[in-house]
Amino acid sequence: MVDNTGKVMREVVVKELWSYPVKGCQGVAVDSLQITKMGIVGDRIFSLWEEGGALVSQKETPKIASIAARFTPENGVLELSHATHGSYRHSIRSEGDRLASKWVLDKFETIDQGDEVAEWLSILLEKNVRLVTPDQPWKIVLPHPLLKRMHDSEKQKFFAASEVSLANRASLDDLNSRLESPVPMDRFRVNVVVDGIDAYEEDEMDALANENVELLQVSAAERCVIIATDQKTGHRPKNNILQVLGEYRRRSAETKFSSGLLFGNYMTVGREGLLRTGDRLSFA
Protein backbone atom coordinates (compact mmCIF):
# COMPACT_ATOMS: atom_id res chain seq x y z
CA MET A 1 0.00 0.00 0.00
CA VAL A 2 1.24 3.49 -0.88
CA ASP A 3 0.03 6.93 0.21
CA ASN A 4 -0.80 9.84 -2.10
CA THR A 5 2.88 10.90 -2.17
CA GLY A 6 4.06 7.49 -3.31
CA LYS A 7 5.47 6.39 0.07
CA VAL A 8 5.07 2.72 0.94
CA MET A 9 2.72 2.35 3.91
CA ARG A 10 3.22 -0.31 6.59
CA GLU A 11 0.99 -1.45 9.43
CA VAL A 12 1.07 -2.34 13.09
CA VAL A 13 -1.62 -4.31 14.90
CA VAL A 14 -3.00 -3.14 18.25
CA LYS A 15 -2.55 -6.09 20.60
CA GLU A 16 -3.29 -4.57 24.02
CA LEU A 17 -4.99 -1.45 25.36
CA TRP A 18 -4.63 -0.22 28.93
CA SER A 19 -6.21 2.46 31.08
CA TYR A 20 -4.86 3.73 34.42
CA PRO A 21 -7.68 5.48 36.31
CA VAL A 22 -5.49 6.47 39.28
CA LYS A 23 -1.96 7.63 38.52
CA GLY A 24 0.47 5.10 39.99
CA CYS A 25 -2.14 2.42 40.74
CA GLN A 26 -2.65 -0.74 38.68
CA GLY A 27 -3.82 -0.52 35.10
CA VAL A 28 -6.86 -2.17 33.55
CA ALA A 29 -6.74 -4.07 30.25
CA VAL A 30 -9.61 -2.91 28.02
CA ASP A 31 -10.98 -3.70 24.57
CA SER A 32 -11.14 -0.08 23.41
CA LEU A 33 -10.00 3.43 24.30
CA GLN A 34 -11.80 6.66 23.48
CA ILE A 35 -8.93 8.99 22.60
CA THR A 36 -9.41 12.75 22.82
CA LYS A 37 -7.07 15.73 22.62
CA MET A 38 -7.40 16.11 26.40
CA GLY A 39 -6.33 12.51 26.90
CA ILE A 40 -7.91 9.07 27.04
CA VAL A 41 -11.38 8.91 28.59
CA GLY A 42 -11.04 7.36 32.06
CA ASP A 43 -7.23 7.37 32.04
CA ARG A 44 -5.23 9.05 34.83
CA ILE A 45 -8.13 11.18 36.00
CA PHE A 46 -7.29 10.66 39.68
CA SER A 47 -4.03 11.06 41.56
CA LEU A 48 -2.84 10.94 45.16
CA TRP A 49 -1.17 13.83 46.93
CA GLU A 50 0.47 14.11 50.30
CA GLU A 51 -0.97 16.77 52.56
CA GLY A 52 2.21 18.79 52.11
CA GLY A 53 1.47 19.11 48.39
CA ALA A 54 3.73 16.42 46.85
CA LEU A 55 2.42 14.01 44.20
CA VAL A 56 2.44 10.39 45.39
CA SER A 57 4.10 8.20 42.76
CA GLN A 58 5.70 4.78 42.52
CA LYS A 59 9.13 6.38 42.60
CA GLU A 60 9.00 7.02 46.34
CA THR A 61 5.86 5.01 47.24
CA PRO A 62 6.05 1.73 45.27
CA LYS A 63 3.26 0.23 47.40
CA ILE A 64 0.78 2.30 45.39
CA ALA A 65 1.22 -0.28 42.60
CA SER A 66 -0.50 -2.89 44.78
CA ILE A 67 -3.81 -1.00 44.58
CA ALA A 68 -6.17 -2.10 41.80
CA ALA A 69 -8.31 0.68 40.35
CA ARG A 70 -11.23 0.50 37.94
CA PHE A 71 -13.29 3.51 36.83
CA THR A 72 -16.62 3.53 35.01
CA PRO A 73 -17.06 6.89 33.24
CA GLU A 74 -20.76 6.25 32.61
CA ASN A 75 -21.64 6.38 36.32
CA GLY A 76 -18.54 8.05 37.72
CA VAL A 77 -17.72 5.20 40.10
CA LEU A 78 -14.12 4.38 41.04
CA GLU A 79 -13.53 0.91 42.50
CA LEU A 80 -10.36 0.44 44.55
CA SER A 81 -9.18 -2.90 45.89
CA HIS A 82 -6.16 -4.45 47.58
CA ALA A 83 -5.18 -8.06 48.29
CA THR A 84 -5.13 -7.58 52.08
CA HIS A 85 -7.08 -4.34 52.53
CA GLY A 86 -10.44 -5.12 50.96
CA SER A 87 -12.20 -2.80 48.54
CA TYR A 88 -13.73 0.66 48.41
CA ARG A 89 -16.24 2.25 46.02
CA HIS A 90 -16.09 5.99 45.45
CA SER A 91 -18.38 8.20 43.38
CA ILE A 92 -16.43 11.00 41.74
CA ARG A 93 -17.08 14.46 43.14
CA SER A 94 -17.28 17.52 40.93
CA GLU A 95 -17.52 19.77 43.99
CA GLY A 96 -15.19 19.88 46.97
CA ASP A 97 -12.21 21.67 48.41
CA ARG A 98 -10.01 23.17 45.71
CA LEU A 99 -6.32 22.47 46.19
CA ALA A 100 -3.55 24.43 44.50
CA SER A 101 -1.17 21.85 43.02
CA LYS A 102 2.18 21.86 41.29
CA TRP A 103 3.69 18.96 39.36
CA VAL A 104 7.12 19.52 37.81
CA LEU A 105 6.52 22.88 36.06
CA ASP A 106 2.72 22.61 35.73
CA LYS A 107 0.49 24.59 38.10
CA PHE A 108 -3.23 23.80 38.40
CA GLU A 109 -6.14 23.29 40.79
CA THR A 110 -7.59 19.95 41.85
CA ILE A 111 -10.82 18.87 43.54
CA ASP A 112 -10.39 16.92 46.77
CA GLN A 113 -12.47 13.73 46.76
CA GLY A 114 -13.26 13.69 50.46
CA ASP A 115 -12.20 12.26 53.79
CA GLU A 116 -13.57 8.71 53.53
CA VAL A 117 -11.60 7.61 50.47
CA ALA A 118 -8.56 9.51 51.79
CA GLU A 119 -8.73 7.56 55.05
CA TRP A 120 -8.97 4.20 53.23
CA LEU A 121 -5.92 5.02 51.11
CA SER A 122 -3.95 6.58 53.98
CA ILE A 123 -4.31 3.50 56.17
CA LEU A 124 -3.19 1.26 53.31
CA LEU A 125 -0.19 3.41 52.37
CA GLU A 126 0.67 4.29 55.98
CA LYS A 127 0.82 8.01 55.29
CA ASN A 128 -1.69 10.81 54.92
CA VAL A 129 -2.81 11.19 51.31
CA ARG A 130 -5.68 12.85 49.46
CA LEU A 131 -7.38 11.57 46.31
CA VAL A 132 -7.98 14.38 43.80
CA THR A 133 -9.21 15.03 40.27
CA PRO A 134 -8.33 18.01 38.03
CA ASP A 135 -10.63 21.01 38.21
CA GLN A 136 -10.06 22.82 34.88
CA PRO A 137 -7.66 22.20 31.98
CA TRP A 138 -4.23 23.72 32.46
CA LYS A 139 -1.39 24.74 30.19
CA ILE A 140 1.32 22.10 29.84
CA VAL A 141 4.82 23.36 30.57
CA LEU A 142 7.24 21.12 28.65
CA PRO A 143 9.94 23.43 27.30
CA HIS A 144 12.37 20.74 26.10
CA PRO A 145 12.79 20.77 22.28
CA LEU A 146 12.25 17.00 22.03
CA LEU A 147 8.72 17.56 23.35
CA LYS A 148 7.86 20.35 20.90
CA ARG A 149 4.69 18.61 19.72
CA MET A 150 3.28 19.15 23.22
CA HIS A 151 4.23 22.84 23.41
CA ASP A 152 1.20 25.12 23.86
CA SER A 153 -1.03 22.14 24.69
CA GLU A 154 -3.54 21.83 27.52
CA LYS A 155 -4.46 18.84 29.61
CA GLN A 156 -6.94 17.80 32.27
CA LYS A 157 -5.41 14.46 33.20
CA PHE A 158 -2.34 13.34 35.11
CA PHE A 159 -0.30 11.95 32.20
CA ALA A 160 3.41 12.70 32.24
CA ALA A 161 4.44 13.97 28.81
CA SER A 162 1.65 13.15 26.35
CA GLU A 163 -1.92 11.90 26.12
CA VAL A 164 -1.04 8.40 24.89
CA SER A 165 1.93 6.10 25.49
CA LEU A 166 2.86 3.21 23.22
CA ALA A 167 5.18 0.21 23.21
CA ASN A 168 6.13 -2.51 20.74
CA ARG A 169 6.13 -6.22 21.62
CA ALA A 170 9.25 -6.88 19.57
CA SER A 171 11.14 -4.25 21.57
CA LEU A 172 10.17 -5.94 24.84
CA ASP A 173 11.31 -9.29 23.44
CA ASP A 174 14.68 -7.76 22.58
CA LEU A 175 15.03 -6.14 26.01
CA ASN A 176 14.09 -9.38 27.78
CA SER A 177 16.74 -11.27 25.81
CA ARG A 178 19.32 -9.04 27.52
CA LEU A 179 17.96 -9.21 31.08
CA GLU A 180 18.78 -11.61 33.89
CA SER A 181 15.03 -12.08 34.43
CA PRO A 182 12.40 -11.14 31.83
CA VAL A 183 9.78 -8.52 32.68
CA PRO A 184 6.16 -8.20 31.52
CA MET A 185 4.90 -5.29 29.46
CA ASP A 186 2.96 -3.87 32.41
CA ARG A 187 6.23 -2.53 33.87
CA PHE A 188 6.07 0.30 31.32
CA ARG A 189 2.48 1.36 32.03
CA VAL A 190 1.68 2.15 28.40
CA ASN A 191 -1.78 2.61 26.90
CA VAL A 192 -1.19 0.94 23.53
CA VAL A 193 0.84 -2.19 22.76
CA VAL A 194 1.49 -2.93 19.08
CA ASP A 195 3.00 -5.79 17.09
CA GLY A 196 4.10 -6.35 13.52
CA ILE A 197 7.32 -4.31 13.31
CA ASP A 198 10.94 -4.86 14.28
CA ALA A 199 12.33 -3.97 17.70
CA TYR A 200 12.57 -0.19 18.21
CA GLU A 201 11.19 0.55 14.76
CA GLU A 202 8.48 2.48 16.61
CA ASP A 203 11.05 5.25 17.18
CA GLU A 204 10.96 6.04 13.45
CA MET A 205 7.17 6.31 13.09
CA ASP A 206 6.10 9.93 12.82
CA ALA A 207 2.39 9.09 12.78
CA LEU A 208 0.07 6.10 13.16
CA ALA A 209 -3.43 6.28 11.74
CA ASN A 210 -6.53 4.47 10.55
CA GLU A 211 -9.97 5.78 9.58
CA ASN A 212 -10.86 6.46 13.23
CA VAL A 213 -7.83 7.91 14.96
CA GLU A 214 -4.38 9.41 14.37
CA LEU A 215 -1.47 9.36 16.83
CA LEU A 216 1.57 11.59 16.31
CA GLN A 217 4.96 10.79 17.76
CA VAL A 218 6.25 13.19 20.41
CA SER A 219 9.41 11.41 21.56
CA ALA A 220 10.80 8.12 22.74
CA ALA A 221 9.82 7.75 26.41
CA GLU A 222 12.48 8.15 29.08
CA ARG A 223 12.22 5.67 31.95
CA CYS A 224 12.84 5.69 35.71
CA VAL A 225 12.83 3.22 38.61
CA ILE A 226 9.12 2.51 38.08
CA ILE A 227 10.04 -0.07 35.41
CA ALA A 228 11.90 -2.00 38.13
CA THR A 229 8.69 -2.18 40.21
CA ASP A 230 6.36 -5.20 40.18
CA GLN A 231 3.03 -3.76 39.03
CA LYS A 232 0.95 -6.15 41.12
CA THR A 233 2.77 -6.13 44.46
CA GLY A 234 4.77 -2.90 44.50
CA HIS A 235 7.93 -4.86 45.30
CA ARG A 236 11.21 -4.15 43.53
CA PRO A 237 12.81 -7.52 42.84
CA LYS A 238 16.48 -7.59 42.00
CA ASN A 239 16.78 -6.92 38.28
CA ASN A 240 19.30 -5.25 35.99
CA ILE A 241 16.72 -3.55 33.75
CA LEU A 242 17.86 0.05 34.33
CA GLN A 243 21.51 -0.89 33.90
CA VAL A 244 20.79 -2.77 30.67
CA LEU A 245 18.74 0.04 29.14
CA GLY A 246 21.57 2.38 30.03
CA GLU A 247 24.00 0.24 28.04
CA TYR A 248 22.18 0.38 24.71
CA ARG A 249 19.15 2.71 24.89
CA ARG A 250 20.40 5.96 26.39
CA ARG A 251 20.21 9.56 25.26
CA SER A 252 23.20 11.79 25.83
CA ALA A 253 23.29 14.10 28.82
CA GLU A 254 23.01 17.03 26.41
CA THR A 255 19.78 15.84 24.76
CA LYS A 256 17.84 13.99 27.48
CA PHE A 257 14.89 15.60 29.28
CA SER A 258 14.79 13.12 32.18
CA SER A 259 16.73 9.89 32.78
CA GLY A 260 17.69 9.38 29.13
CA LEU A 261 16.83 5.63 29.36
CA LEU A 262 14.56 4.85 26.42
CA PHE A 263 11.68 2.42 26.02
CA GLY A 264 8.34 3.02 24.34
CA ASN A 265 7.02 6.27 22.93
CA TYR A 266 5.00 9.31 23.87
CA MET A 267 2.23 10.00 21.35
CA THR A 268 -0.08 12.97 20.98
CA VAL A 269 -3.46 13.07 19.27
CA GLY A 270 -3.80 14.20 15.68
CA ARG A 271 -7.37 12.97 15.27
CA GLU A 272 -9.73 11.96 18.06
CA GLY A 273 -11.55 8.65 17.90
CA LEU A 274 -12.08 5.13 19.17
CA LEU A 275 -9.15 2.68 19.14
CA ARG A 276 -9.84 -1.05 19.55
CA THR A 277 -7.72 -4.13 20.09
CA GLY A 278 -7.16 -5.77 16.72
CA ASP A 279 -7.16 -2.43 14.88
CA ARG A 280 -4.51 -1.87 12.25
CA LEU A 281 -2.66 1.43 12.15
CA SER A 282 -0.68 2.55 9.13
CA PHE A 283 2.59 4.47 8.99
CA ALA A 284 4.99 5.49 6.25
Image: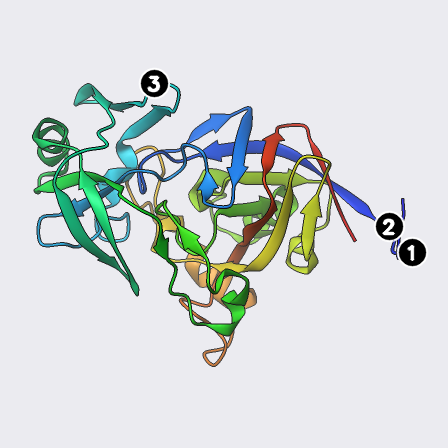
Horizontal and vertical percent position of residue 276? 61, 28
**Mark 3 and mark 2: span between their CA atoms?**
42 Å
List the residue tagged with mark 1: 6
**Kind of residue at badge 2:** Asp
Q: Residue 55 or 142: which is nearer the viewer?
A: 142
Quarter occupied by residue 233? top left
Quarter occupied by residue 168? top right
Left or right side of 150 for 124: left
Is disc 3 surrounded by few (<14), some (14 to 19) or many (20+) residues within 10 Å? few
Q: Residue 152 or 106: which is nearer the viewer?
A: 152
Q: Is residue 184 visible?
A: no
**Kind of residue at badge 3:** Asn
Query: Helix or strand or loop: what does disc 3 sit on?
Result: loop
Is disc 1 surrounded by few (<14), some (14 to 19) or many (20+) residues within 10 Å? few
**Kind of residue at badge 1:** Gly
Q: How many marks?
A: 3
Query: Helix or strand or loop: what does disc 2 sit on?
Result: loop
Is disc 2 surrounded by few (<14), some (14 to 19) or many (20+) residues within 10 Å? few
Which quadrant would the N terminus be assigned to in this image? top right
Left or right side of 2 for 182: left
**Mark 1 and mark 3: span between their CA atoms?**
47 Å
Horizontal and vertical percent position of residue 39? 46, 43
Query: Helix or strand or loop: what does disc 1 sit on?
Result: loop
List the residue tagged with mark 3: 75
Task: Say which residue appears at 36% left-offset and 44% top-offset.
Answer: 157
Task: Say which residue appears at 9% left-offset and 48% top-offset.
Answer: 51
> Does residue 79 lie above or below 153 as drawn?
above
Q: Is residue 101 visible?
A: yes
Q: Are marks 1 and 2 in contact (CB under 8 Å)?
A: yes
Horizontal and vertical percent position of residue 148? 53, 67
List the residue tagged with mark 2: 3
